């Protein structure tokens, strides 16, 4: 990987303000990009309106700016790319690589324990409200190589499952949107939380269907609360404090296995991050860790 070719990204959903777990991911992806003198992009994944909070996108961008996590280029909003997703789906429908599916989760659970069995694959169903669109799994992916954790296998029954690319509720599927956006942005490495390990192999399958090389992957350890649950917006993790920015940066860096300079309390966030980018080493990151 050459320095000029490195493009990383941070892609939060606007379902609320960033919390400490979000900060760990943002800092890890930012420093990995800066260490390689590459570009770091920010993408707001705003294609799931029922989960979104009004004004959260602006809050997230302000938080990143306050913490010295300054992005390159313009912020990308997935909601501006809906036509791109639809064009790809239309192409697959036209070539017979995708099909409409009327199965509910309950039906799939009863028939095959929750793993889709291809029930609608050859029924030639028409486009009607309440039907999903699935993609034929012509090139199964059985795992992928993670830069921190090594080979990550995917269960065989999941590897052969036809992926949903358009949901029954009329929304574009996460896996499709994230892959198309990362391709269009020429993302070379994805640094994100280990809660997304399972979808990664499926996303690799989409890259192959699109005849594109998948990026490198590095999944960071998850920050958890005192009960062992990962910090998340769904679990009501507290938002980052705007009055203890340096302390939270210090804690995120320590969580990622890196020692900060003794003078960290006197350094503005951008300067502290610039210094840490020089000594950043992904080999210091513990692959399994809870807060």
Image: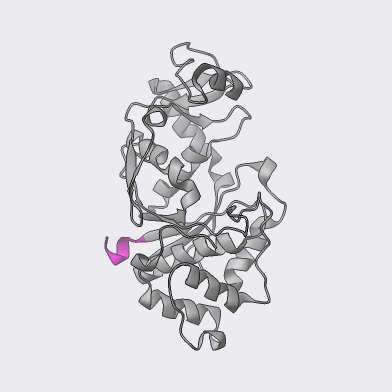
Q: Position of residue 32 (x, y in %)?
A: 39, 66
Residue at coordinates 48% horizontally, 25% vertically from top-left? 115
Query: Looking at the figure, which quarter contains the C terminus?
Result: bottom right
Q: Position of residue 97 (x, y in %)?
A: 39, 23
Magenta-drawn stretch contains 5: yes
Query: Looking at the figure, which quarter contains the N terminus?
Result: bottom left
For the residue pair 179 and 241, the one nearer the viewer reads as 241
Which residue sits furthest left? Answer: 2
Residue at coordinates 34% horizontally, 50% vertically from top-left? 215
- Where is 27 relative to 76, above or below? below
Q: Position of residue 212 (x, y in %)?
A: 32, 41
Magenta-drawn stretch contains 190: no
- Where is 192 relative to 111, above or below? below
Specify the quadrant of the image occupied by residue 144. Answer: top left
Magenta segment range? 1-6
For the residue pair 18 and 170, the one nearer the viewer reads as 18
Residue at coordinates 51% horizontally, 33% vertically from top-left? 86
- Where is 205 relative to 44, above or below? above
- Where is 59 relative to 235, above or below? below
Residue at coordinates 63% horizontally, 21% vertically from top-left? 129
In the image, is 168 to the left or to the right of 9?
right
Residue 84 seen in the figure? no
Q: Position of residue 72 (x, y in %)?
A: 47, 65
For the residue pair 225 and 60, the one nearer the viewer reads as 225
């Amino acid at each position: 990987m050459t320095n000029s070719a490195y493009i990383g990204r941070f892609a939060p959903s606007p379902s609320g303000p960033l919390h400490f777990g979000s900060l760990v991911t943002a800092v890890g992806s930012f420093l990995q990009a800066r260490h390689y003198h590459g570009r770091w992009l920010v993408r707001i994944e705003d294609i799931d309106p029922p989960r979104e909070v009004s004004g959260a996108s602006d809050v997230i961008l302000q938080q990143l700016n306050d913490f010295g996590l300054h992005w390159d280029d313009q912020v990308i909003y997935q909601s501006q790319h809906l036509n791109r997703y639809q064009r790809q789906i239309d192409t697959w429908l036209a070539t017979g690589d995708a099909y409409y599916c009327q199965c509910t989760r309950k039906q799939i659970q009863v028939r095959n324990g929750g793993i889709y069995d291809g029930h609608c694959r050859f029924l030639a169903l028409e486009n009607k409200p309440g039907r999903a669109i699935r993609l034929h799994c012509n090139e199964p992916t059985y795992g992928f190589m993670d830069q921190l954790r090594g080979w990550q296998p995917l269960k065989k029954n999941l590897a052969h499952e036809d992926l949903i690319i358009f949901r029954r509720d009329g929304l574009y599927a996460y896996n499709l949107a994230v892959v198309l956006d990362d391709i269009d942005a020429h993302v070379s490495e994805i640094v994100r939380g280990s809660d997304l390990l399972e979808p990664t192999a499926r996303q690799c399958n989409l890259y192959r269907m699109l005849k594109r090389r998948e990026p490198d992957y590095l999944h960071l350890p998850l920050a958890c609360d005192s009960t062992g649950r990962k910090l998340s917006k769904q679990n009501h993790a507290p938002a980052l404090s705007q009055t203890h920015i340096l302390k939270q940066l210090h804690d995120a860096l320590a969580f990622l296995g890196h020692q900060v300079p003794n003078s960290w309390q006197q350094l503005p966030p951008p300067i502290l991050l610039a210094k840490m980018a020089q000594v950043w080493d992904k080999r210091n990151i513990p692959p399994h860790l809870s807060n």
